Image: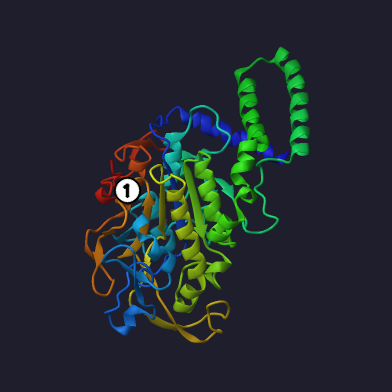
Amino acid sequence: MGSLSLPGLFRLRAEAAAAGAERSERTAVILVWLRGGCSHLDTYDPKPDAPSEYRGPFKPIDTRTPGLQLTELIPLQARISDKFTVLRSMAHTGAGHPSGSLQLLSGDPDMQDKPEPVFPDVMAVADYFRSGGPPRALPNYIGVNPIVRYDGFVIAGPAFLGPSHEPFAVTGDPSAPDFRVPNIGLPEAEAHRLQTRLGLRRRMDDVRRAIDASRSVQSMDTFQERAIDLLTSPEAAVAFDLGREDPRVRDRYGRHAWGQQCLMARRLVEAGVDLVTTTFDGPLCGRVANWDDHAVNHHVFDALEHRAPAFDQAVSALIEDVYARGLDRRVMVIVTGEFGRTPRISYVASSGGGVASGEAGTVQPGRDHWPRANSMIWAGGGIRTGQVIGSTDRYGEDVADRRVGPHDFLATIYRHLGIDPEATIPDRFGRPIPIAPDGRPIPELAATS
């Protein structure tokens, strides 16, 4: 019964709902987060003509998009490049993982790392505007391995909007045989016992109301019943139950954490959830469990080769499935990390041996933080796909054409969700805070008619 702390969450969301705007269209976003930052030169922006100290070992391959080459690490994505757009010209000034994440996800312009967000992230803001309306079986914002922390730093969150706009967190490995989402879809016998207890509580409350017929008691009933609905909802149980998928579909996504995270994300938006984040980290990344491929952490090229099959499989399956199931106008998929990696390869001694890293003291190649250029992909959302936006110079160091900043990134997501990028939200003191100051939605990513 400890899960009945859920009423507090529902109560907070209802209190915030009065300030939320009514949605005009049930659009949705899935954000796939590469925690630590992915090397753009070794994936979406290869530089085969650059000197050897830049280009890396992976060969460029052609794609279905004329003139677009990716690297050989992601052949499945290359085969479906007509279903996404590559943005090669994202740049900002956040060189640390916290500052880079906060700049991209919340628009915080500060170049310095900080322990927690000052401004709410894009998904929390979207949840604020989309709160309210009739009760729903599923939370509106769900994190399947949510974006929360980088080491001891909080890199995303609702900040002054409050905990009511945190994601409903699904943690653990969805590919594990014993995986189960807590607080969702109790087994029938447990649900019956819970409903019986609820009936007893109602009878006790009838007596209490005779003494105190306050609105607060009635409100508590409402939020507790919504928590009960989530605990016993067959719709919620179905949405989270990957066992209901055709085994061939699960195989296509990959029987690993990232593949099943993406499959769950697709099931959730199909069931009506508007906002889903999923983080790619953990053992599939290598020794330090993220994409932070300094030479002290990983042999960068061994690490990329280690994680590429799962990454390529999960992302390509998600994008293909969104189109195959007719979700491509409603659902936008974005794949990115907080920044790119240094184009010039560094060589430093490893701090420890393990997956994709030599024994301690082994000098190995790495790439460091690089906020001056980053690549990301966008799919769905009704956008024109099979295109490339922007470019970097011959070394991949700086944006050469069509520079895009974090506020433009945020404004593009807000536009898809039907939220005015010029809107404001009140801070703790009621002051209006712009949600994407000076940001302009990326015109090449506008929905086509």
The single residue placed furthest to the bottom in the displayed view is 362
| Label 1 Cα crowd, 10 Å radius (few <14 / some 14-19 / many 20+) | many
Q: How many labels, in total?
A: 1
| Image quarter of residue 88 | bottom left
Please report the residue visible at 40 percent of the width from the left and 42 percent of the height from the top.
Answer: 330
The image's colour scheme reads rainbow
Please report the residue visible at 27 percent of the width from the left and 75 percent of the height from the top.
Answer: 395
Q: Amino acid at mark 1?
A: Ile
Quadrant location of the N terminus in the rendered image: top right
Vertical relation: 282 (above or below) 57? above
Q: Position of residue 101 (x, y in %)?
A: 41, 57
Vertical relation: 331 (above or below) 405? above
Q: Is residue 243 left or right of residue 406?
A: right
Please say whether residue 84 is visible from this viewpoint: no
Please say whether residue 205 is visible from this viewpoint: yes
Q: Position of residue 129 (x, y in %)?
A: 42, 35
Q: Nearer the viewer, residue 159 or 380?
A: 380
Q: Nearer the viewer, residue 40 or 73?
A: 73
Q: Position of residue 110 (x, y in %)?
A: 35, 55
Q: Is residue 197 left or right of residue 407?
A: right
Q: Position of residue 331 (x, y in %)?
A: 42, 45
Vertical relation: 273 (above or below) 195? below
Assign a secondary structure to mark 1.
loop
| Image quarter of residue 12 | top right
Quadrant location of the C terminus in the rendered image: top left
The single residue placed furthest to the top in the displayed view is 210
Disc 1 target residue: 383
Please report the residue visible at 38 percent of the width from the left and 52 percent of the height from the top.
Answer: 379
Q: Nearer the viewer, residue 263 or 62?
A: 62
